[in-house]
Image (spheres, rainbow, N blue to C red):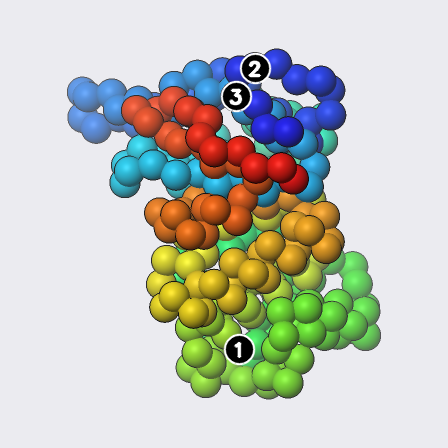
Amino acid sequence: MVKIDGTSNGNSLIRVRGLGKTYHRGSEELHVLRGLNLDIEPGEFVAFMGPSGSGKTTLLNLLGGLDLPTTGSVSVAGEEITALSAHKLTAWRARHVGFVFQMYNLIPVLTAFQNVELPLLLTRLSKAERRKHVETALALVGLAERSRHFPRQLSGGEEQRVAIARAVVTDPTFLLCDEPTGDLDRRSADEIMGLIDRLVHEYGKTVLMVTHDPRAAERAHAILHLDKGTLIEGERKAS
């Protein structure tokens, strides 16, 4: 279940309390997020929607440890990540979070295989173990035969598949997807959402996704709307 009222039955994978983020522009204070509470259980697929500037990406960055809140806390699997040092937070992200971005963020001079392998270079896995993990991830996204291709040789949809393979290759605790279909045509977008849906239902992944696309959001178990820095619950489907 997904809850935004600050109550929890103790099964939360992600627990957010009183989360706030304020930016300063000269003497002006810009309150992007205001006192958010959020509980997400393992295996949930949650979509965050809202107008541009409503704080969706800021929230995703806070949940993934890419940014620190002005107030409040974020805990994942019982560990309060907002209390970690910068060094420990970097190590925590590498172990627990898979990121999927709108623009893929692939390195042009590396092959699909090498792009997917990048997160594993921070681990103690042997070269043979890394190869096995990469091959498994590329097969999962349907690109086993394209491993030696460079990003410029792939379609946008294929590039995003490589990005998803890179995100899951370390078997992270959860995935953060920021507009994963925003740069794709309808057909490619539907294919990517089908893949994310499969990660949730077949592999039990927890996925948090920011999107402007109602068709993409429809795949989620729950849709949460950000409005003026606060969360409002929208449609909820049976898991």
Quadrant of residue 38 within the rendered picture: top right
Vertical relation: 150 (above or below) 60: below
SS type, badge 1: loop
Q: Indicate the position of residue 110 as horizontal and vertical percent values.
A: 53, 77
SS type, badge 3: loop
> Pointers 3 and 2 in contact (CB under 8 A)?
yes
Residue type (three-letter) at the residue carrying disc 2: Gly
Looking at the rendered image, the quarter that the C terminus falls into is top right
Of badges 1 and 3, nearer the viewer stands: 3
Kindly report the distance in space between the C-alpha atoms of the residues bearing marks 1 and 3: 41 Å
Quadrant of residue 81 within the rendered picture: top right
Vertical relation: 104 (above or below) 90: below
Q: Indicate the position of residue 208 as horizontal and vertical percent values.
A: 54, 42
User: Which residue is disc 3 drawn over?
Assistant: 4
User: Which residue is disc 1 drawn over?
Assistant: 110
SS type, badge 2: loop
Count numbered badges in the picture: 3
Residue type (three-letter) at the residue carrying disc 3: Ile
Instruction: Tell which of 226 and 112 is nearer to you.
Output: 226
Q: Earlier in the sequence, mark 1 or mark 3?
A: 3
User: Which residue is disc 2 drawn over?
Assistant: 6
Residue type (three-letter) at the residue carrying disc 1: Leu
Q: Indicate the position of residue 109 as horizontal and vertical percent values.
A: 48, 79
Looking at the rendered image, the quarter that the N terminus falls into is top right
> Pointers 2 and 1 in contact (CB under 8 A)?
no
Kindly report the distance in space between the C-alpha atoms of the residues bearing marks 2 and 1: 44 Å
Instruction: Tell which of 141 and 125 is nearer to you.
Output: 141
Instruction: Tell which of 222 and 4 is nearer to you.
Output: 222
Instruction: Tell which of 236 and 19 is nearer to you.
Output: 236
